[in-house]
Image (cartoon, rainbow, N blue to C red):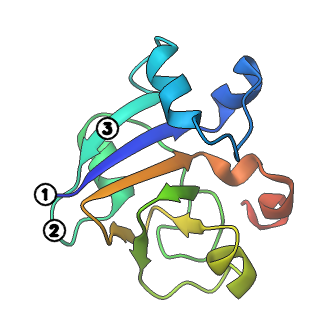
């Protein structure tokens, strides 16, 4: 069963961390963050990451659940998420910036590390509803 290690984008500023820090997840593991901000989820085969988070009782951001907005965007730091049809992200955002939508994204690796709540990134702001 794939495991997704997650970190809430909103805590990066609080700690002075950057998205491209090589040791971002090590820092998070050492920071004594609450479970809602950092931890791991087991995701069933064919289950979307957002669904797995909700099954654990987390209230991650989303709106449409159809890949048509950026509310549930996450940045994949390690591993990958396969997405169903999405109409909102550019090829550059998917291929170079590793943006994925958790509402239609399933783990494509046994271990995935992602920063959820990435809707706050400047280049995604215009697609948040």
Residue sitting at 44 percent across and 23 percent down? 29
Question: In the picture, residue 83 is in which quadrant?
Answer: bottom left
> At numbered mark 1, what does the secondary structure look like: helix, strand or loop?
loop
Residue sitting at 21 percent across and 72 percent down? 46
Instruction: Say few, some or many: other residues with alpha carbon within 10 Å of mark 3 (under 14 / 14 to 19 / 20 or more).
Output: some
Q: Is residue 23 left or right of residue 52?
A: right
Q: Earlier in the sequence, mark 2 or mark 1?
A: 1
Q: Is residue 126 left or right of residue 95?
A: right
Which of 111 and 45 lies nearest the eye of the viewer? Answer: 111
Pointers 3 and 1 in contact (C-beta within 8 Å): no
Q: Position of residue 33 (x, y in %)?
A: 48, 16
* As drawn, 14 above or below 8: above
Which of 32 and 102 lies nearest the eye of the viewer? Answer: 32
Q: Position of residue 111 (x, y in %)?
A: 30, 55
Mark 2 highlights which residue? 45
> At numbered mark 3, what does the secondary structure look like: helix, strand or loop?
strand
Q: Is residue 46 left or right of residue 75?
A: left
> At numbered mark 2, what does the secondary structure look like: helix, strand or loop?
loop
- Quadrant where the N terminus sits is bottom left
Residue 21 seen: yes
Pointers 2 and 1 in contact (C-beta within 8 Å): yes
The span from disc 2 to disc 1 (Cα, nearest Å) is: 7 Å
Q: Position of residue 77 (x, y in %)?
A: 54, 54
Q: What label sits on residue 1 in the rendered view?
A: 1
* As drawn, 89 above or below 43: below
Which of 46 and 64 lies nearest the eye of the viewer? Answer: 46
Q: What label sits on residue 40 in the rendered view?
A: 3
Q: Residue furthest front?
A: 22
Instruction: Say few, some or many: other residues with alpha carbon within 10 Å of mark 2 (under 14 / 14 to 19 / 20 or more).
Output: few
Q: Earlier in the sequence, mark 3 or mark 1?
A: 1
Q: Earlier in the sequence, mark 2 or mark 3?
A: 3
């Amino acid at each position: 069963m794939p495991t997704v290690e997650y970190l809430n984008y909103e805590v990066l500023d609080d700690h002075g961390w950057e998205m491209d820090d090589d040791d971002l997840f090590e820092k998070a593991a050492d920071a004594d963050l609450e479970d809602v901000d950092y931890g791991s989820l087991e995701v069933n085969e064919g289950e979307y990451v957002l669904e797995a988070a909700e099954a654990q009782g987390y209230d991650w951001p989303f709106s449409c659940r159809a890949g048509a907005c950026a509310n549930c965007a996450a940045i994949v730091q390690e591993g990958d998420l396969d997405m169903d049809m999405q109409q909102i992200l550019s090829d550059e955002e998917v291929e170079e910036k590793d943006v994925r939508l958790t509402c239609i994204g399933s783990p494509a690796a046994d271990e995935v590390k992602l920063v959820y709540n990435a809707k706050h990134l400047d280049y995604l702001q215009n697609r948040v509803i």
